[in-house]
Amino acid sequence: MFIGIESIKEAKSEVNIEGEGPNKSLLTAYLSGFMIAISPANIVFWIGVFGPVLVSSLGNASTSTFILIAVGIILGIFMHDMVLLGFVHFTRRFLNPTFIKWVSISAAIALFGFSGYFGYECIKQVITFISKA
């Protein structure tokens, strides 16, 4: 929900295509990035991608090999994020500011939908859990 609200607020502001620094605090930028990084979808994605590798290496490798594989996975995730950020940074110059605003608003609406759905499912599960107790 937080990211959706931030996305709507950002859509009202002037889109900066030249790549200059945005006029928001470091804390706000950090919180936005942190909320994306700890989102359940992101965590499930990375566990789904690298979980089987870690599980198979845990049974077949020594502790040092397992740690080396885990560090390699973390470095791979970091490299993936850096390439993605670079792609967004360089392709942003080719997009129309109006298009960027509408994508931002559409993403916010989708985030509101997902947060509403998962909030409803959470409440439903809590009610089921309480009624069984």
Image (cartoon, helix red, strand yellow):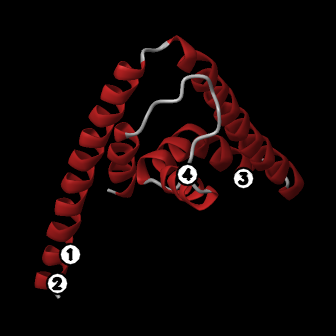
The structure residue drawn at horizontal position 23% and vertical position 62%, both measured from the top left corner, is 119
Q: Distance from label 3 to label 2 (Cα)?
A: 37 Å
Look at discs 3 and 1 and give the one toward the viewer. 1
Of 14 and 125, nearer the camera is 14
The residue sitting at 57% across, 52% down in the picture is: 29
Q: Residue 109 is drawn in which quadrant?
A: top left
Residue 126 circle label? 1
Q: CA distance from mark 3 to mark 4?
A: 43 Å
The residue where tag 3 is placed is 58
Q: Mark 1: which secondary structure?
A: helix
Q: Alpha-carbon distance for marks 1 and 2?
A: 6 Å
Q: Are marks 4 and 2 in contact (CB under 8 Å)?
A: no
- The three-letter code of the residue at mark 3 reads Leu
Q: Secondary structure at mark 4?
A: loop
Which residue is located at x 24 percent, y 49 percent?
A: 112
- Disc ID at residue 130: 2
Looking at the image, is mark 3 or mark 1 earlier in the sequence? 3
Image location of residue 99, percent across then percent down = 35, 19
Residue under label 4, please give it. 24
